[in-house]
Amino acid sequence: MEGENSGLFSGIRNGGYIVEIRHPDDRDQTVKSRNPIRALAGQTMVYGLGTVVPRTLNYLLLTFFYTRVFQQGEYGVVTELYAYAAFLLVLLTYGMETALFRFAESEEDGGKVYGTALGSLVITSGIFIAAVLVFSRPLAGVIRYSSNVEYIVYFALIIGIDAFTSIPFAWLRQQNRAFRFALLKIINVTVNILFNLFFLYLCPRIMEGDPDSFIRWIYNPEIGVGYAFISNLIATSVTLILLLPELRGAGISIDWPLLRRMLNYAFPLLVVGLAGMVNEVSDKILLKYLWPDPETALQQVGVYGASYRLAVLMTIFTQMFRYAAEPFFFSHARKEEAGRIYSDVLKYFVICGLVIFLVVMLYMDLVRLFLGKEFREGLHVVPIILLANLLLGVVYNLSIWYKLKNLTRFGAVIGIAGALVTLVLNVILIPAIGYLGCAWAHLACYVVMVLISYFWGQKYMPVRYEIRTLTAYFMLALSLYFASVFFAITHFWTRTAVHTLLLAAFCLVVYFAEQPKVKKSFPR
């Protein structure tokens, strides 16, 4: 599992709402360009290739693999436990990565900031691991895994190590050591995938051909889904070992007055991050407990979790954008045309997001192949999840006002409002319509957050966003999608050709509508 560093969870941990203060070199590259939108696009690609793409390959490949080697209920176990892990990882890092960025820039001795953050995480991660190991059996009973206490042990180690190593990874970013950062992430993804293939594909086939093979000494078929977690733990441990050079040179020591200031800074971000995790993963946890039939609850979780992952293209786009956007927004904050730039960024973000929405939905015949056949019954939630994740990206854009105005407490309020919508609607809808209710709650949450962010932001930092244009593009994309559904074409190649024309129609409309504005606003 990854924090900033490893496995499946990089980028999701903070719910996408935490302010990250980047290295000054990042901002310099943005300022140099005469065309700020092109600069942002370039930075988005750089961050995407270096951080998000390896994670997404891991995400897609393992989804493809797991939905073919696991049954629905087994994959439900994977989905649910990683949902718990994502929430706990936010709690255990408690905004300290962002505090490291902030104080390493403002303090004279950046190394002291690093050592303080690292020391703090050593203590809290160690306490967490020890506490979970001691109480693993009652904890397993609480979440209905009494017969698999070992799962709790695996995740205690994974989450604790991940939380701790998030600080040296943040330090690599702060020091602008992007190559080593990306290399370690790629190694982690590779190790995780290889061990999954080894335990869940190669070993069973060797045992089938030769039951007395030496493999029996390292492979036990009864562990089953547990090998997914063991592979993750191995990858996380390898990452920790590879980070030893950064840990040896840290000089771990806590400056207590500095730590108090860092914690005061990080606390509102922790609240925002926890609220974000409620929005992102609570549905996968609640579904098991609120679905009326306990016997099929994990199957529901498995189908929903698999379908949810087909929205990964939108997820990767919004995460790539988030990595690049915050330093970009801060670097343009004092410019006279800042409001126009922010408006244009939101518009082009929405355009790109709608293209992704149409690509996934118009070519669902191909996209659905990422899932095993028994998991495809949940495909009807994919458009809802895609739109929800697109609106999450809109929230990233609109949140700039409280970050620039140092009003992060408003971000916490917005996040909590979204979390309440998520929880209330899940409680109401899951018993009635199952995981479809989870999807609608997810979308409703971000609709509410977008509306609050927009109207509140206009009060404190007015920006003339092109609301009519954005609404028109949304309506056009949705109309094209519904047309493809209503006028269903049975022949595959004819359907593909027509859907390609629909996608091209959207792109052409946007091109001819935006080309004059682009030439006027951003001359080469």
Image (spheres, grey):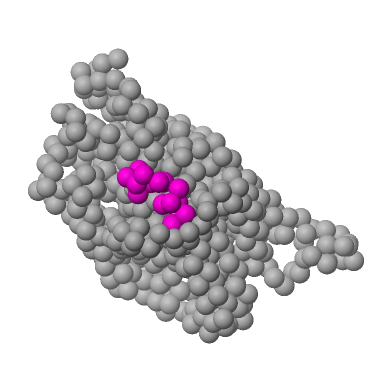
State the residue in front, 167 or 63. 167
Residue 409 found in image quarter = bottom left
| Residue 433 image offset from top left, x and y in percent | 37, 69
Quadrant of the snapshot with the N terminus: bottom right
Q: Which residues are magenta?
A: 103-118
| Residue 61 image offset from top left, x and y in percent | 59, 48
Quadrant of the snapshot with the C terminus: top left
Side (left or right) of 70 relative to 34: right
Side (left or right) of 205 relative to 423: right
Residue that appears at 38% across and 33% down? 26
Please identify the residue farthest to the top as the structure is shown.
524
Residue 280 found in image quarter = bottom left
Q: Is residue 225 magenta?
A: no
Q: Is residue 113 magenta?
A: yes
State the residue in front, 264 or 313. 264
Rendered position, 385 above or below 292: above
Residue that appears at 31% across and 69% down? 423
